[in-house]
Amino acid sequence: MGKRHVMSETATIEIAPASAGFGGSDTGWRGLIALTADFVFETDLWGRFVHVSAKPGLAWSQRALLGQSAAALMAGSPDAGGTDGDGINPFRPASPQRGVRAWIRRGDGGVICLSFTAAPVVDSDGRILGARGFAIDLAEGGPRIARVAADARRADVLDNVLRDVGREVLAPRMIAAGLETLVRSMGARGAAIVVVPPDAPLFVAHRAGDDADHVPPIPSIQAYDLPAAATRSLTADNRPLLTTGCAPRFGDPAVLLIWRQPDAPGWDGDDQRLIGSAANIIRMVFEHEGIRRDLASRARHDPLTGLLNRVAFLEDIERHIIRLEQEAAPGTLLIAGLDYLGMVNQRLGHEAGDRVLTQAAGLMRQSLRPTDLVGRLEGDQFGIWMSGADRLTAAERADALRERAHDAFAALLGAEGPKVGLSIGIASRRPGTDEDLDGLVARTSQAFEAAKRGGRGQWRVSLRDGD
């Protein structure tokens, strides 16, 4: 068999072919390097380990690594292709490399920064057959070097998070990319953003990682000083859990969580500082998402009552009608108007009128099913859409709503206040008819005007031929 060469910066050293294994001078090379290095390796043509020796502190066994892809140990960005995020893979050098810093996954799920010296193994024709090299743990070089390594790690992770977030356009995908990069860079199993509404159950807004479907329970989360972005290291279900506040300036408070596999080493101070910095990036995107969602909601909702505005209400009815046609089911539209609201504004002021409007909106919400729609059409008029309901069911609902509104407004305005009530028009649409939404609205409006003329506080139904 022919010889092959290790190319160094100063000389070409002939050694036995990789297929011959380690022997002779290789034994001396391995032993000498092992005295000072924390990680020694040789890879084959396909980037798999054919020799590896790791100090116990890396938590890797030789048996676990032999035959495995060396690139799988890289803890860079998920899109980095087995590199450290800057396109450098110390396990597959194209030329001799010295002092290459890279983040490696430990056998226990953590990550560690190593400084690599490596060179390609080539044959007599210069073809690369693999690589040899060794690495040193920067954290063992003293406090100053450890601090430099920790700062460099934090910069690398934040650069990767920023890069991957910047590749996306939509806020949810930006957050997912940032969380995924954070998980991989910190040797974690999963990460999530949990929203903590003041008066409602918490919920998971975003998640990422191999274990994303198993968000650990969050002890004492309600007691966190979330706006202060306090970072805490906890344990949940035997999984080391790192949490930090991720509260946007607008909207409900939130917490960023990241966790490792069960019984893995806990998070240290450097980890806490790193996630605190990363949370600032993710929080800005999360805040942007909240602002966008709020603007979208404002475009569809009436600012006083919170109900759908006229445009959104009619658009949603169109979608309901399409589905009802497929299901061969009816739908019914109601238009309800407040009687004597103008008198309330004149005698008691517009603030009292606004209270009547918001109370009417609340009564309609309480009277409807989850599948029904309610919107504020204009001024003192509201619209109600009941999917699957015929005119008889709608009439029963209208009568009950009219009675409840009369009592509620009397209690709100007092015995001396105007006698505010509801007049309601009703029209149903049967499946298979040629009536469009405009025609249905026109019929319902006619029934509403008839209720007004009939003495107010009444309801009327519009019928078509065949009803």
Image: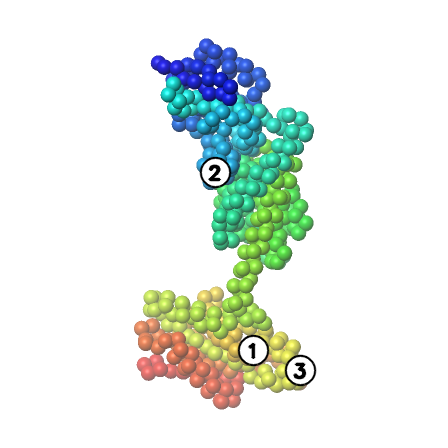
- Give the distance between the C-alpha atoms of the residues marked 2 and 3, in whole angstroms: 67 Å
Q: Is residue 44 above or below residue 217?
A: above
- Look at 59% across and 32% down and name the residue there: 265
Among the two numbered marks 2 and 3 on one chain, the one whose residue lies closer to the N terminus: 2
Q: Which residue is mark 2?
A: 80
Q: Nearer the viewer, mark 2 or mark 3?
A: 2
* Residue 269 shown left or right of residue 182 in the figure: right
Q: Is residue 372 above or below residue 121?
A: below
Q: Which residue is mark 3?
A: 348
SS assignment at label 1: helix
Nearer-the-camera pick, 378 or 29: 29
- Look at 40% across and 78% down and name the residue there: 438
Nearer-the-camera pick, 388 or 112: 112
- Callout 1 environment at 10 Å: few (<14), some (14 to 19), or many (20+)? many
Label 1 amino acid? Ala
Residue 229 in the image, given as x and y percentages of width and height: 65, 48
- Look at 54% across and 38% down and name the residue there: 185
Among the two numbered marks 2 and 1 on one chain, the one whose residue lies closer to the N terminus: 2
Locate residue 290: give its quadrant: bottom right
Q: Residue furthest top?
A: 24
Residue 181 in the image, given as x and y percentages of width and height: 52, 42
Quarter holding the N terminus? top left
SS assignment at label 2: loop
Which numbered marker is on residue 405? 1
